[in-house]
């Protein structure tokens, strides 16, 4: 992109020609801040579209400043073209403006002296004032546009910083949320494990309760059996006492004397008439049966189980077989 520029008397119009170089005392700090930001700012720190607009606007403003006497010096002006300055050359261009203005002022001054000699000074000054006023208005408008663009740039930078802060805050919140989710998952797994352990404990408790009930029932049954065995033992003891009296009576040779000393009416010989016919061979066998019955009865008292009771009952039956043997 190229912009036309004309040789002017930059020394007399230094108020316009030195606006970009910073020599104008009327230029605001905002304009100087724009120029400094354009020269020193990195491309990644500002908006690229806004930066491009500002770069393209600088040569346009400069061309308007340097073109203020275009209508008065149509025959003597020379047109040159300059490229749009790059970001690297902005700083050099700003520092070189004074030197160029000093160098260009000499030929323009010579041309002005020639115009004064020809007597054309009055119309030139009048038209120059009008053009200067018009270009001053345009310059003010351009300055306002630059200020607006700078404000927009600052707003965009603030928005970008705010967005970055919001993004970091969102990332922090997401990290905290993920951490809370992990803690919640760990607690859920712990709760499930505790529930499983509780279920197992309930099952074991139910098994133990059932075993306890079974043990209680077995204890109650054993108690009943024990009472029954005790009754059987008491009954057998009574029978044993009766048998002992009877056997003592049988072993005595003198039955009459024994009957006088002891009252054995329930076991009188008339209840066992077949004993009178018993010989001496059966009496030893009866004595052995009696001793076996006594031993079985002692064992039943000591052990108190079904086997010992059955042995005692068998010995009793064997002894009864001798006592209640029929005559036939």
Image: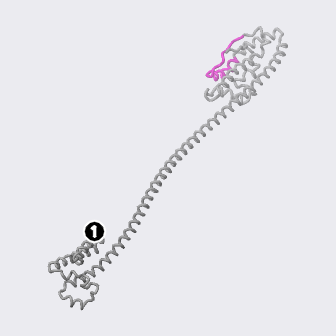
> Looking at this rendering, what residue extends furthest in the left direction?
281
Residue annotated with mark 1: 307
Tell me if residue 284 is in the magenta stretch: no
Question: What kind of element bears circle 1?
Answer: helix
Q: Is residue 261 left or right of residue 91?
A: left
In this rendered view, identify the residue nearer to me: 28 or 256.
Answer: 256
Q: In which quadrant is the N terminus drawn?
A: top right
- On the image, the x and y values in percent for residue 62 come to 72, 19
Task: Judge whether 175 appears above or below 123 on screen.
Answer: below
Is residue 128 shown above or below 237? Answer: above
Is residue 273 visible to the viewer in this orientation of the structure? yes
User: Compared to 148, does 306 lie above or below?
Assistant: below
> Residue, x 70% and y 30% (percent of image)?
152
**Foreground residue among 252 and 74:** 252
Tell whether position 85 is magenta: yes
Relative side of 250 to 125, left or right: left
Specify the quadrant of the image occupied by residue 309: bottom left
The residue lying toward the viewer, choosing from 212 and 34, is 212
Quadrant (top left/top right/bottom left/bottom right) for the C terminus: bottom left
Relative to 30, 217 lies left or right: left
Camera-side residue of 311 and 36? 311
Q: Is residue 28 left or right of residue 204?
A: right
Give the x, y percent position of residue 237.
Answer: 29, 79
The reply to whether residue 294 is visible in this rendering is no
Where is residue 280 drawn, in percent x and y? Answer: 14, 80
- Pointer 1 local density, CA inside 10 Å: few below 14, some 14–19, many at least 20: few
Asked if residue 212 is positioned above or below residue 21 in the image, the reply reads: below
Residue shown at the point (70%, 18%) measured from the top left: 102
Span colored in magenta: 79-102
Quarter of the rendering containing residue 16: top right
Picture coordinates of residue 23, whole percent (x, y): 71, 25
Which colour assignment does the render follow? one colour
């Amino acid at each position: 992109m190229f912009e036309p520029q004309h040789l002017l008397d930059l020394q007399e119009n230094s108020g316009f020609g030195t606006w970009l170089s910073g020599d104008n005392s009327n230029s605001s700090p905002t304009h100087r801040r724009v120029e400094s930001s354009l020269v020193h700012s990195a491309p990644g720190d500002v908006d690229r579209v806004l930066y491009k607009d500002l770069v393209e606007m600088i040569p346009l403003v400069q061309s308007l400043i340097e073109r203020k006497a275009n209508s008065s010096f149509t025959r003597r002006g020379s047109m040159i073209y300059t490229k749009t300055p790059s970001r690297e050359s902005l700083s050099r261009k700003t520092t070189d403006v004074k030197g160029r203005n000093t160098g260009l002022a000499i030929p323009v001054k010579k041309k002005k002296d020639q115009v004064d000699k020809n007597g054309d000074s009055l119309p030139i000054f009048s038209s120059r004032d009008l053009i200067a006023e018009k270009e001053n208005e345009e310059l003010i408008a351009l300055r306002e546009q630059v200020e607006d663009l700078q404000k927009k740039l600052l707003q965009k930078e603030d928005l970008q910083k705010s967005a970055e802060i919001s993004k970091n805050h969102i990332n922090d919140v997401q990290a905290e949320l993920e951490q809370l989710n992990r803690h919640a998952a760990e607690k859920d797994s712990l709760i499930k494990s505790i529930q499983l352990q509780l279920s197992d404990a309930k099952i074991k408790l139910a098994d133990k309760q059932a075993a306890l009930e079974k043990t209680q029932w077995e204890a109650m049954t054993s108690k009943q059996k024990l009472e029954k065995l005790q009754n059987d033992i008491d009954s057998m003891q009574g029978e044993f006492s009766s048998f002992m009296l009877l056997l003592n009576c049988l072993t005595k040779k003198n039955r009459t004397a024994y009957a006088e000393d002891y009252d054995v009416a329930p076991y009188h010989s008339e209840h066992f008439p077949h004993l009178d016919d018993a010989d001496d061979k059966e009496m030893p066998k009866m004595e052995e049966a009696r001793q076996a019955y006594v031993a079985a009865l002692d064992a039943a008292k000591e052990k108190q189980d079904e086997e010992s009771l059955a042995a005692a009952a068998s010995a009793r039956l064997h002894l009864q077989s001798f006592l209640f043997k029929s005559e036939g």
